[in-house]
Amino acid sequence: MIDTSFLDQLTRFNLVVNKRVTSNLAGPRKSIAAGRGSTFKDFRIYAPGDDIRLIDWRVYARTDNLYIRVKEEERNLTVHIIIDGSASMGFGKPVSKFDYASMIGVGFAYLALRDNEKFQFSTFADQLEIFQPRRGMSHLAAMVQHLNSIKP
């Protein structure tokens, strides 16, 4: 049985992502793609076919070369949480390995929601159960309810 009272203790933690996001949806996280975001990334030399609206005319005035201002796109993050529900996770009394794994998964989901990110969770034992990515505390409550129904 998962006790969610520990979530109050997570207020001092943040979800830190060191890698850039590859999502297609716009959001606050840095993307691996250069594009039309709001954050300046770099200059690159103009190549035929580039949009002339992206030329930085101030740099051209200083260097006499055409440069494009490259911006960094910002994307949304989807946190994927996968929890093993097999019989081996039933080890341990009074709290099993499955309970600990579930609490860690719920903690990561809570941190993602607090940063207004989506999370997708999956459980597996004999078969894989996938719950679609969503935002909102109701999705977290559904996750806890599902995890409480699993008996490894």
Image: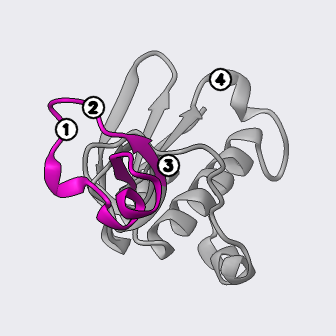
Residue kind at label 3, given as amino acid type: Leu
Q: Quadrant of the N terminus?
A: bottom right
Q: Quadrant of residue 14?
A: bottom right
Q: CA distance from mark 3 to mark 2?
A: 54 Å
Q: CA distance from mark 1 to mark 2?
A: 6 Å
Q: Which residues are magenta?
A: 42-71
Residue position marked by numbered label 4 in the rendering:
87
Say which element carries label 3: helix
In the picture, the disc for residue 147 is: 3
Return the disc, 3 or 1, that comes first in the chain's sequence: 1
Residue kind at label 4, given as amino acid type: Ala
In the picture, the disc for residue 74 is: none
Return the disc, 4 or 3, that comes first in the chain's sequence: 4
Residue sitting at x 43%, y 42%: 44
In the picture, the disc for residue 50 is: 1
Evaluate if marks 1 and 2 touch, with contact meaning CB atoms under 8 Å apart.
Answer: yes
Evaluate if marks 3 and 2 touch, with contact meaning CB atoms under 8 Å apart.
Answer: no
Residue 64 lies in the magenta stretch: yes
In the rendered structure, the answer to whether residue 144 lies left or right of residue 57 reads right
Q: Which mark is nearer the camera, 3 or 2? A: 2
Say which element carries label 1: loop
In the rendered structure, the answer to whether residue 119 lies left or right of residue 53 reads right
Q: Residue furthest right?
A: 93
How crowded pointer 3 is (Cα within 10 Å; few <14, some 14-19, many 20+) is rated as: many
Q: Which mark is nearer the camera, 3 or 1? A: 1
Q: CA distance from mark 3 to mark 1?
A: 51 Å
Residue position marked by numbered label 2 in the rendering:
47
| Residue 14 visible | yes
Evaluate if marks 4 and 3 touch, with contact meaning CB atoms under 8 Å apart.
Answer: no
